[in-house]
Structures are given as structure tokens and as C-alpha cells.
Amino acid sequence: MEATIEVRGLRKRYGPTLAVDDLSFTVVPGQVTGFVGPNGSGKSTTLRMILGLVRPDGGAALLGGRPYHELRTPLCHVGAMLDAGVIHPARRARDHLLWIAHAGGLPARRADEVIELTGLASVARRPVGGFSLGMRQRLGIAAALMGDPPMLMFDEPVNGLDPEGVRWIRGLLRARADEGRAVLVSSHLMSELEDSADHLVVIGKGRLVADAPVAELIAAASRNRLRLRTARRSEAMTVLAGAGATVAVTGHETVVVSDLPAERVAALLSEHGLPVGELAAHRASLEEAYMDLTGDAVEFRAAREDR
């Protein structure tokens, strides 16, 4: 079965609110695809429609060319973690995974394999109610990996993880993509996606805003911007803004300058006797690129399915 997640013209309305509006994108094998957007943009509703938990009003979501309800052994095709907290608190971690194995027709040994893989061996026989958020996240990831599926979907997988756990999940996502699996990750942490994602799908108000490689988005956000370091930052900002530049503070002595070429910036600072410690092309962060793309979509009444 081809490991491709396809969203084709998905639409979903809740009363007067259009939560997802003609949304289309593809998650291809061999890549980690980040799925981002402001709160209420339709991310959670989209993920639930892909997994058959919410029925779309239009369009289709396909997993390896088929809708979720047509998969005969779903766990062996797609693994997902949307909410790590939906486990009975009295159930032990290993028992939870054994139940998933039984329900999915998988051998019991698979539960122990994913317990080892996710670092839960020392707490496998403890009730989930005593787990930290990070431990619950690991258990949710373990459940998603049970069927060794070619497609994976995670909603905020690093939520609650400590730095070692964040590094671990980053490596896990990368390794699964390198094995040729399709990996879709919804996250609010642009810094994490910048380090782990190959591609980014950005939505706002239920519609597609961008669908491009991470490197391409960063390059576009970096274009025509300069990084300036000067000991007289406030005076430099006044001079440059007066000449039509857009200036943003990034540090005690540093700013990012847009809308003026480097030669003009240097000349203006020289004319006013302002020192220049550094003047160079600015490399934007993924967060800067994201904010540029979604600036018009942050004020939006969330659909009831999204948080």
C-alpha cells in the first residue's frame, strides 16, 4: 500500500462557522511534514476527518489511496496520536498496549517492543493515572507505533516532554521518515519543526495558506532583510525608519531591517555618524516565516472541534 496521506478539497461547517474550507494537500513518504496554523484554523478538525472521526461535508481524505473506514487493518496502515490523555487512569501502560494489540490482531510481543522503543520499560506496569504529561505522550506514541504503519500522524507530540524527550521524538520522526514513511506532525513549536520537518503545510481560517519545503519558506522570509548590529540602536532605528525602512528589534544592539538595500543602510548610518558593528543578510527563523504567512489569520473564532 502506498504510504501517502491525501487531503482533497475537504470542507467542514459547524453551524455558521466554516471550520475547513476546500483544503487540499499531500503528505508524501520519506518526509516529515509539519501541519501548522493559528488556534481555530481547522487543524484538529482536519486531522479528525483524515482518521474518520469527523465526517466531512465535502471532499475526501485518503490514506494510501483509501478512506480510513475502508482499511481492513487500520493499525498496520496508519498510526496516530491526537490526545494522549484519553486513557483510563487505572489501566496500566502495558495492559493498555496489550488491549490495542488484541483489538488490532497484533502479537502481544509488539506491546513490549514499543515499550522499549519509547523508553517506558521502567513504568510499564504502573497505572497511567500516575503518569506525567511527558510519559503519557510517550505512551500515546507507543500506541501509534503498534502496527509498524507506513503512515504516522501526531498532534503536538513534544508537549510535556523534557529536553531529552524532545530530542528523542525529533530523532524518532526523522528515522521513520528516512525509512520511507509519511509523517504528519501538527505543532505550535516552530523551533521544533525547523529542526525536524522537511515540508510545511500552513492553514488559516480553514484554508490553505502555504504548502512548501521548510527551506523555501525560510528563504522567502529572509529575502531583502538585513541584520544590523550597532551600539546606538535607537538612533539608527529612527534614521532608517525615516528613510522608509521597516525595523524590528531582535536584541540589545541588533535589529532586522527591511525595505532598504544594504548600500543605502550603510550610507545613511555613515551620514549620521552611527557605528556599524555588523551589517549582513538576515536568515529568518521558521517562526518569522510562519508569522509573516499567518498574520491575517490569528483573529478567528475557533470551531468547536479545535483548541
Image: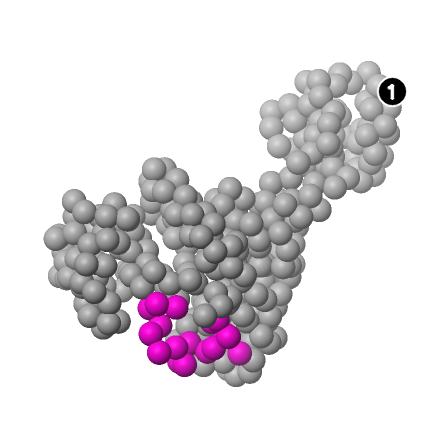
Count of all numbered marks drawn on residues in the image: 1
- Residue 166 seen from this side: no
x 65%, y 27%: residue: 254
Q: Position of residue 287 (x, y in %)?
A: 57, 45
Residue 69 in the image: state x and y as whole percent. Answer: 40, 80
Position of the C terminus, as image quadrant, is: bottom left
Seen at 35% across and 78% down, the residue is: 72
Picture coordinates of residue 206 (x, y %)? 57, 69
- Residue 93 falls in which quadrant of the image? bottom left
Q: Which residues are magenta?
A: 60-77
State the scheme by which the image is colored.
one colour
Residue type at the position of mark 1:
Glu
Q: Is residue 146 left or right of residue 123?
A: right
Q: Which residue is mark 1?
A: 271
The image position of residue 306, as x and y in percent, is 45, 66
- Mark 1 Cα-neighbour bin, 10 Å: few <14, some 14–19, many ≥20: few
Dot 1: element: helix
Q: Nearer the viewer, residue 4 or 188?
A: 4
